[in-house]
Image (cartoon, rainbow, N blue to C red):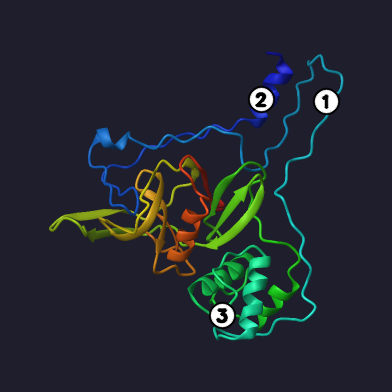
Amino acid sequence: MTQASHHTQNARALVVASFGLISLVISGCSGVVSSSAEAAVQSPALVELAPPFTTTPTTLPPETTIATVTTLPPLQPVVVAVASMAVPLVAVGQTDGPETARVQQRLLDLGFWLQSTNGDYGVTTSQAVMAFQKYAGLVANSEVDDATAAALTNATTRAYGTANQGSLIEVDKDRQLLFIIQEAYTVWTINISSGSGIPFKERDKNEWGKWVQGDAITPNGIFVIDRQVEKGWRTGDLGDIYRPKYFNMGIGLHGAYKIPNYPASHGCVRMSTPAMDYIWSADLAPMGMKIWVHSTPPAA
């Protein structure tokens, strides 16, 4: 291998280091607890793949025999333009009606998944509005207020994630959003709630007298879906979860009744039960699908 190709290969490879789990720490919403040194080393095997985010091209050293090096521009997420609305939307709060149907259609046009444009302000409309508000940096109250109506009216692009290549599910913990991405194009954006980061100690829901404790964290990294439960609700040690798709031991994507505008789970990635049903029916998160979980590191 030439020195030039060696550097090029390094520029495109991403090796994600695996990490150990702390003994007696819950690994996710299913209630799987590691209580021994042997269990503690059973960390998930993170996958090695081309990065779903921009890398900085490397520069060849001065002693290279290549006379000219062409630096390619970094890859970018696929961004789809949309036109602003000729007839502005008006604030509807959370009420039903023809104007809400217009809001629903606009949310779909902007890439925020919901079930119907029938004018009923139901669960998926409320969740889509919250997702849009998070994406736009507005107060995430699930209500179409004046600021939200104006932002929906004047939006110029479909929502898109950070990933700039490949097909994967991106979980943005900072914005509390999930992006379903196919070949760098964001198909849908969905409201989520990830791990609260708060230590907990709770009674086991399955075994009387047993306690479950840990830190409610959704770890950053690149994983793959390796286990799932297709039918209905699954009773975990920390509560019921709906049609889960696991990607990090007991941590997975799943449906839930409560998806607030802040991180609130024990570590899993919550979304509405209709959104989870849609992901299953459209086969948007098959076994082996890459899951990229990320957040901005705290300032030093």
- Residue 46 location, x and y as percent? 46, 36
**Mark 3 — residue?**
143
Number of labelled discs? 3
**Cα gap from disc 2 to disc 1, whole angstroms:** 15 Å
Q: State the residue at coordinates (32%, 42%).
A: 22
Badge 2 or badge 3: first in the primary sequence: 2
What numbered label is drawn on residue 9?
2
Query: Where 157 falls versus 215 (above or below)?
Result: below
**Cα gap from disc 1 to disc 3, whole angstroms:** 53 Å
Q: State the residue at coordinates (64%, 26%).
A: 10
The residue type indicated by label 2 comes to: Gln
| Residue 263, quarter of the rendered image | bottom left
At numbered mark 3, what does the secondary structure look like: helix, strand or loop? Answer: loop
Q: Is residue 148 visible?
A: no
Q: Are marks 1 and 3 in contact (CB under 8 Å)?
A: no
In the foreground, 128 or 74: 128
Q: Which label lies toward us, 2 or 3?
A: 3
What numbered label is drawn on residue 69?
1
At numbered mark 1, what does the secondary structure look like: helix, strand or loop? Answer: loop
Asked if residue 187 lies left or right of residue 257, the reply is right
Label 3: how many Cα within 10 Å (few below 14, some 14–19, many 20+):
many
Q: Which label lies toward us, 1 or 3?
A: 3
Q: Is residue 40 visible?
A: yes
Asked if residue 44 lies left or right of residue 52, the reply is left
- Residue 283 location, x and y as percent? 51, 50
- Residue 105 location, x and y as percent? 65, 72
Asked if residue 68 lies left or right of residue 278, the reply is right
| Residue 125, quarter of the rendered image | bottom right
